[in-house]
């Protein structure tokens, strides 16, 4: 997987969240609020799926687990936030990454504790050529969810675009730890290794 399609990711996310939307809340929960039992349950399920993905034995099994993980990661996204995501998807499909980034920013003002939203804004920024902004957003995304293989894939692309071959390789190694069945992962690793260190003598 040499390139990530932001628009394809958004389409998947929006369809995945449609069936799992929670009722809109008037305010985001303060950062100091203890995690609810429901959130703890989601985190427990997510940790289990992360472990299953890392131990998956074939691409079909891994693909199913990836889908389940995305559903868990997006199920707390509220309807108002999802509307902004849909608008951003249209803007990305029309090659207007700047406008999409603004809408992702608005979505983050509603739910800045959702790692996927930081990941999506990073995708928009990378499409617009803002590699440093993308890397910054991915840093926040990974603080919230350090086991998100998709964020690590995007970080690989951002670091590669920024010209830091060793950082890109390191990020891809993390991808392979989390999702060893990812199609083309070994070939991508070889290309990044060659780019970072050159051909062995």
Image: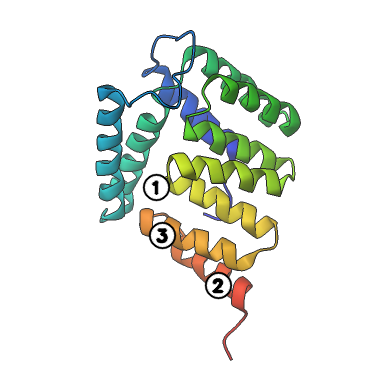
In-front residue for pair 44/69: 44
Q: Residue at x 48, y 8 (%)?
A: 26
Q: CA distance from mark 2 to mark 1?
A: 22 Å
Residue 21 higher or lower than 128, as above or below: above
Q: Earlier in the sequence, mark 3 or mark 2?
A: 3
User: SS for tag 3?
Assistant: helix
Residue 56 higher or lower than 40, as above or below: below
Q: Earlier in the sequence, mark 1 or mark 3?
A: 1
| Mark 2 surroundings: few (<14), some (14-19) or many (≥20) residues within 10 A | some
Image check: 92 left or right of 180?
right
Display coloring = rainbow
Q: Position of residue 48 (x, y in %)?
A: 24, 42
The reply to whether residue 106 is visible in this rendering is: yes
Label 3, on which residue? 176
Label 1, on which residue? 147
Image check: 152 left or right of 178?
right
Residue 49 figure quarter: top left
User: SS for tag 2?
Assistant: helix
Q: Quadrant of the C terminus?
A: bottom right
Q: Which mark is residue 193?
A: 2
Q: Nearer the viewer, mark 1 or mark 3?
A: 1
Residue 135 higher or lower than 116, as above or below: below
Marks 2 & 1, CB-CB < 8 Å contact: no
User: SS for tag 1?
Assistant: loop
Q: Residue at x 32, y 48 (%)?
A: 62
Q: Earlier in the sequence, mark 2 or mark 1?
A: 1
| Mark 1 surroundings: few (<14), some (14-19) or many (≥20) residues within 10 A | some
Residue 22 figure quarter: top left
Q: Position of residue 153 (x, y in %)?
A: 51, 51
């Amino acid at each position: 997987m040499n390139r990530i399609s932001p628009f394809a990711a958004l389409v998947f996310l929006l369809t995945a969240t449609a069936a799992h939307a929670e009722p809109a809340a008037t305010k985001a929960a303060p950062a100091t609020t203890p995690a609810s039992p429901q959130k703890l349950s989601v985190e427990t399920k997510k940790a289990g799926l992360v472990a299953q993905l890392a131990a998956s034995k074939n691409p079909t099994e891994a693909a199913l687990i990836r889908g389940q993980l995305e559903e868990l990661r997006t199920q707390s996204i509220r309807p108002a936030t999802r509307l902004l995501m849909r608008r951003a998807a249209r803007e990305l499909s029309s090659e207007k990454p700047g406008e999409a980034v603004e809408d992702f920013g608005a979505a983050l003002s509603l739910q800045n504790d959702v790692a996927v939203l930081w990941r999506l804004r990073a995708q928009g920024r990378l499409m617009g050529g803002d590699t440093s902004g993308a890397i910054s957003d991915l840093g926040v995304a990974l603080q919230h969810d350090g086991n998100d293989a998709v964020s690590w894939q995007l970080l690989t692309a951002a670091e590669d675009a920024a010209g830091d071959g060793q950082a890109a390789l390191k990020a891809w190694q993390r991808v392979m730890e989390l999702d060893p069945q990812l199609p083309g992962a070994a070939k991508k690793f070889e290309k990044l290794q060659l780019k970072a260190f050159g051909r062995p003598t």
